[in-house]
Image (cartoon, rainbow, N blue to C red):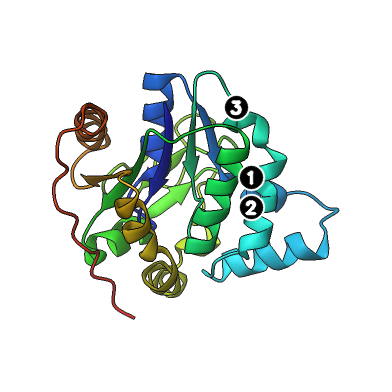
Amino acid sequence: MRLVLVGPPGVGKGTQAALLCRRYRACHLSTGDLFRAASCETDLSPAMQTALDTMRAGGLVSDDLVMELVRERGACLRCCGGFLLDGVPRTLPQAQALGVLLDELHVTLDGVILYDLPAEEIAARICGRRTCPNCKAVYHETAQPPLKSGVCDRCQTALVQRDDDQPEVVRTRLAAYRDATEPLIDFYRDRGELVAVSAAGTPEEVFQRACEALRKHRSGAPAPPTRRTAVQA
């Protein structure tokens, strides 16, 4: 299975990617994870440092740098079990560049899953999220709290709030999504590749919903209409 996951921040794309990868035995390429891993390195290029600063402020990393990162990991796109792209493309130029790259590799997409959720629920999800800096486990203050407040269940490390999960940064991220990422919906719909999935409910409910939507998409059944995420500036 070869999939692209799109949708506003906070809809659970990372969680769904992990579930889908297990189901379809596919490789997972998350540009957000790659950039956050790079932030732990000491010898960064000026371009990478600029990219990390932009991401921490809630902006979108330049198209050229994102696609350079994807090209560097082109082996993932040739994985025999398929791949899931999470975090790319986020802009129309990235989608077009990805299309060129996949054509070069003689690879076609099985679908582009659009996860959708009301803006107010997105903000609540993101601002309540807490992450373990050691094992990368993710919790939520109300929806999925750790057994001991502020401490990771797996490794007992103190949990942190990511820089890009701060309320003021969340507003910037949602505005960036509205301005740059939503045109992808029309792009992939016109190509007949869009699969719309509601991100409401538990991760397992969303996962089952996505699997059923993919099954219908691949069988040629008509897709439900897509609604826009109401994101305020």
Q: Are marks 1 and 2 in contact (CB under 8 Å)?
A: yes
Q: Which residue is mark 3?
A: 78
Asked whether 124 or 108 is in front, the reply is 108
189 on left or right of 66 = left
Where disc 3 sits, the SS reads loop
Q: Nearer the viewer, mark 1 or mark 3?
A: 3
Kindly tell me whether residue 138 is visible in this rendering.
yes
Residue at the image point whose x is 45% and y is 61% from the top:
165
Q: In the rendering, at what x and y percent does residue 38 appear? A: 71, 49
Q: Which residue is mark 1?
A: 70
166 on left or right of 32 = left
The CA distance from mark 3 to mark 2 is: 16 Å
Q: Amino acid at mark 1?
A: Val
76 on left or right of 192 = right
Q: Which residue is mark 2?
A: 67
Q: Residues within 10 Å of mark 1 (few under 14, many from 20)?
A: many
The CA distance from mark 1 to mark 2 is: 5 Å
Q: Residues within 10 Å of mark 3 (few under 14, many from 20)?
A: some
In which quadrant will I find the N terminus?
top left
Residue at the image point whose x is 27% and y is 36% from the top:
203
